[in-house]
Image (spheres, grey):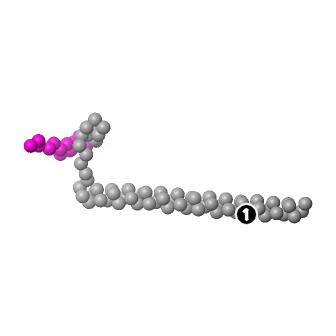
């Protein structure tokens, strides 16, 4: 009976250790993934800023930015040929 108890304690201890290692690895992976996404956003914003921004045509889904109403060139109209 004592051997079974010792065996159970060993197995439970190994399980607890493995679960702790798994949790730590999962958290490290999630942090690394979040950092990669943040860096991607920073690179995109830097690229956009160094290229003068980008233009999105106005439609129902993308109305003009009301906070930029004071800028005369806010809306760009293409001449139709």
* Residue 14 vs residue 50, the one in the foreground: 14
Any part of residue 66 in sight:
no
Looking at the image, the residue that sits furthest to the left is: 81
Question: Could you tell me what secondary structure mostly forms the magenta stretch?
Answer: loop
Give the secondary structure at mark 1: helix
Q: Position of residue 14 (x, y in %)?
A: 73, 63
The residue shown at (57%, 58%) is 27
* Residue 18 vs residue 52, the one in the foreground: 18
Tell me if residue 3 comes above or below residue 65 in the rendering. Answer: below
The C terminus lies in quadrant: top left
Check if residue 74 falls in the magenta segment: yes
Magenta span covers which residues? 67-81
Q: Is residue 35 left or right of residue 69?
A: right
The N terminus lies in quadrant: bottom right
Q: Is residue 54 left or right of residue 25?
A: left
Quadrant of the image occupied by residue 61: top left
* Residue 28 vs residue 6, the one in the foreground: 6
Q: Position of residue 16 (x, y in %)?
A: 71, 60
Residue matched to label 1: 14
Q: Position of residue 54 (x, y in %)?
A: 25, 51
The residue shown at (21%, 44%) is 74
Label 1 crowd (10 A; few <14 / some 14-19 / many >=20): few
The residue shown at (43%, 57%) is 37
Any part of residue 75 in sight:
yes
Numbered label tally: 1
């Amino acid at each position: 009976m004592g051997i079974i108890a010792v065996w159970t304690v060993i197995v439970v201890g190994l399980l607890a250790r493995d679960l702790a290692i798994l949790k730590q690895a999962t958290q490290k992976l999630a942090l690394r993934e979040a950092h990669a996404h943040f860096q991607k956003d920073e690179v995109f914003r830097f690229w956009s800023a160094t290229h003068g921004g980008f233009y999105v045509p106005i439609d129902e889904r993308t109305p003009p930015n009301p906070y930029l109403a004071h800028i005369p060139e806010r809306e760009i109209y293409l001449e139709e040929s």
